Image: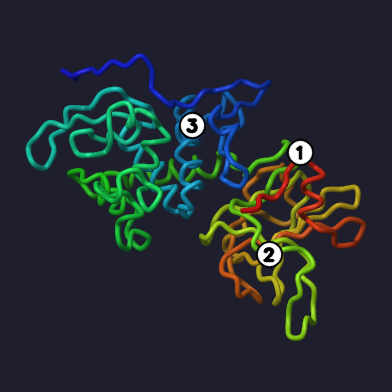
Amino acid sequence: MIAMKTTLSAIGAALVLFLGSAFILGSAASAEAGKGVCAPTDPDMTVAGYSGDQLVNAATIMQNGQQQGVPQEGIVIAVMTAIGESSLRNLDYDDDATNPDGSIADGGGLFQQQPSQGWGAWEEIMDPAYAASAFYGGPQGPNGGSPRGLLDVDGWETMEPSHAAHAVQINADKDHYTKFLPAAEEIVGAITCTAGGTGEWVVPAGGTVTGTFGDCRGNGCSRQHMGTDLADGTCRSPIWAASAGTATKGWTALGGGVVTIDHGNGTVTKYYHQRMQDIRISDGQQVAAGDLIGASGNEGLSSAGCHLHFEVIQDGKHVNPETFMASVGAPLPRQ
């Protein structure tokens, strides 16, 4: 018989707000600029057989990963693990599994984390945001590497995804999660993430401004910096469409892989330094504000590490992206 644990509420659980045909995470609405906001876009949305609070929980996992600078593949692993542990439901009971030392597991929440194994107090592991942060671990995780999270596992990036999850969860079968990987990839691809803004315009990447419009570049100040750089200290972090429009992709020796979006009325935005294999749009594709279009990189003439070089062009003339984005309600975050 399953031993039930009752709580008055799942402390810190995401509040769902219905706004017409869309809904967002209540906790995401007050997220810091540049930290990432992830949400299902429709209350009737079903992805890979998952819906409702399951997708809200997946969005919480994604948002927390972006806040901790976790690469996209790590976020997919976290969603995959939560599917395998709880079917993306914030369970207030354990399945009476047995730990390697013979004790009965006492876990709960999205990742079935156990207070007896040091994952946190019961109220903490029942908070989806805390549970996700504990799973990721690393310098921003709550447990200081004991028990270790994904970012505390040496070489997790080169492991099979299920083996990386197993290194954190220490379950009986290291291949247990493999069957959940396709669903996790589909869910992560379907949930919309942005970094803040008004709705019509959003911040196109996480992180903060690391290079400003008009900076002197090249030998002897031979060229001017025609955009604004955004970086969060990681590679392959998401790049989102700043607003709706028609997208195309290309390559330049100076800027690497680039997505161009024509927003109409003479306004164009460009997103540089991507790897071509990371660009997520096809030529002529219609995109909406916040659609995932690619990932930050260091391609082309770049010495600043992985970042997004973001340009805004109005009536054929480059303008300062910081000034423009502030004017449309999506100011680019500074440290």
The residue to which callout 3 is attached is 55
Residue for point 61% across, 32% down: 41
* Point 15% across, 17% down: residue: 1
Q: Closest to the observer: 122 or 238? A: 122
Residue assigned mark 2? 211
Residue placed most toward the observer, 71 or 127? 127
Q: Helix or strand or loop: what does disc 3 sit on?
A: helix
Tell me the SS state at disc 2.
strand
Answer whether labels 1 and 2 touch (C-beta < 8 Å). Answer: no
Residue farthest toward the left in the current orientation of the protein? 102
Q: Depth-wise, is mark 1 or mark 2 nearer the camera?
A: 2
Pointer 1 local density, CA inside 10 Å: few below 14, some 14–19, many at least 20: some
Rate crowding at label 3 as few (under 14), some (14 to 19) or many (20 or more) other CA atoms within 10 Å. many
Disc 1 residue type (three-letter) = Glu
> Residue 200 got which mark?
1
Could you say where residue 273 lies in the image, as x and y percent from the top left? 64, 67
Please provide percent x and percent y for residue 181. 39, 46
Mark 3 and mark 2 residues within 8 Å of each other at the beta carbon: no
Query: Seen in the image, is 263 located left or right of residue 186?
Result: right
Outermost front residue: 335
Marks 1/3 in contact by CB < 8 Å: the verdict is no
Occupied quadrant, residue 215: bottom right
As shown in the figure, which amino acid type bears the numbered disc 3? Leu
Q: Position of residue 199 (x, y in %)?
A: 72, 36
- Per the image, label 1 sits on a secondary structure element best described as loop
Residue shown at 78% from the left, 55% from the top: 321
Answer with mark 1 or mark 3, whichever residue precedes in sequence: 3
List x then y, in percent, for residue 297.
Answer: 58, 65
Amino acid of disc 2: Gly
Q: Nearer the viewer, mark 3 or mark 2?
A: 2
Compared to residue 92, the image places residue 225 above or below, namely below
